[in-house]
Amino acid sequence: MRVYLDHNATSPLRPEARTAMLAALEAPGNALSVHADGRRARTTIEAARRAVAAAAGANADDVIFTSGGSEANALALRGAVQGAGVAGERITRLIISAIEHDSLRATAALCEETVPGLRILVCPVTASGVADLDELRQMLSEGKGRALVSLMAANNETGVVQPVAEAAKIAHAHGALMHSDAVQAMGKIAVDAKSFDYLSFNAHKFGGPQGVGALVVRQGAPLAPQIRGGGQEFGRRAGTENVAAIAGFAAAVEAAQHSRLNALWRDGLERRLLAAVPHAVVFGFEGERLPNTLCIAAPGVPSENMVIALDLEGFSVSAGAACSSGKVTQSHVLSAMGVETALAARAIRVSFGWNTSEQDLTAFADAWTKIVKRAQARVAA
């Protein structure tokens, strides 16, 4: 029997989400149609919008459904930059942290390429993986023109929770707009949209379906639609809504509010691994982390070898983010934290979720320890 410990990449579909999706799939109707079937689809979407808004501490009208977190990030950045320009108040600086998700980094680069006069500034992080707010404050003080700041709520690789509420206060004090990629936060820690102008979510990180996410946009914040056509999502994102996926999103987010993850399990796993292999290194342990995430490097075992060895033992984990090419590459997150290349090359990420048991973590600890000890024995021989 396999043990799945890669929930930060994708969490298995919750039964509540599956039930909601199957019910929606049985019901025909386009949510823009005025007949009874269309109205039923619209009712499903609006109920889901209220559920997501409630989980985020937002108003339902502020929620825009997207195809996922990457699109939500793209809509936030490009929509804000273009929308501000249309309103006659250009954004001249886009400040992102050094540990942002690749989807946001790529979108920021595209904005810089396509918007004249826009500059990207990168806010560094400390050795513990936390954004340096003094540097952020300095960046905002020195520049001219309006800025847009983007800082993720929690890092997908290390699990380090970022001081986003404080960053938002700093940004707003300097007249800047504030976006946070909260994809890894929802369903794991409390989220409050009231501090932000833009907030991104993704359903499949906490047991919802793949292919659906949301962007929360504060009333009055500039936003230019990136997909135009029909009047869906209040004219802010065209395209027929994926009713079944949206229904699954809502069911998963409601279930997640009643089944909080236990950080004690993570801490117990961490202690057990370090007791077995004292020279192992845990990244981001100094600060607050997501309750389900452990990023650790074992001496003498490269990330790729560890991932493959654990896979053969029946455990699914990853080496850093599992997004772009499927290959194990150098982590820009660990590099930003000042981790030496040789050490970063041994890091793996263990992330558990709603269907993980303590027995799963105990079995993982035994397998990980066996692999490390075996590698050490080969070196000694």
Image (spheres, helix red, strand yellow):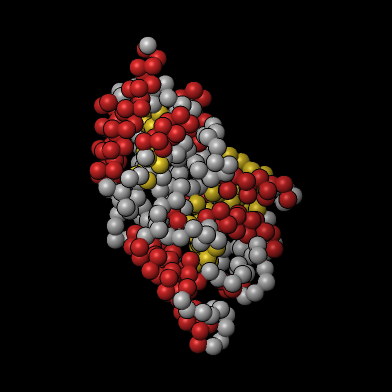
Single out the residue that lies furthest toward the bottom. Answer: 35
Name which quarter of the figure residue 381 lies in.
Answer: top left
29 and 83: which is toward the camera:
29
Single out the residue that lies furthest toward the top. Answer: 381
189 and 168: which is toward the camera:
189
Give above or below for 354 relative to 125: below
Q: How many numbered circles are shown?
A: 0
Q: Residue at x 53, y 69 (%)?
A: 242
Give above or below for 49 relative to 186: below
123 and 153: which is toward the camera:
153
Q: Residue at x 39, y 65 (%)?
A: 17
User: Left or right: where does residue 129 sit relative to residue 78?
Assistant: left
Visible residue check, residue 204: yes
Q: Residue at x 57, y 44 (%)?
A: 324
Question: Where residue 371 sits in the image (x, y, percent)?
Answer: 36, 27
User: Left or right: where does residue 150 sit relative to residue 372?
Assistant: right
Question: Where residue 222 sits in the image (x, y, percent)?
Answer: 61, 63
Question: Where residue 236 sits in the image (x, y, percent)?
Answer: 60, 68
Visible residue check, residue 60: no
Give above or below for 366 relative to 173: above
Quadrant in which the N terminus is drawn: top left
Question: Where residue 124 sits in the image (x, y, percent)?
Answer: 52, 36
Q: Residue at x 63, y 59 (%)?
A: 79
User: Left or right: where does residue 128 sit relative to residue 80?
Assistant: left
Name which quarter of the figure residue 252 lies in.
Answer: bottom left
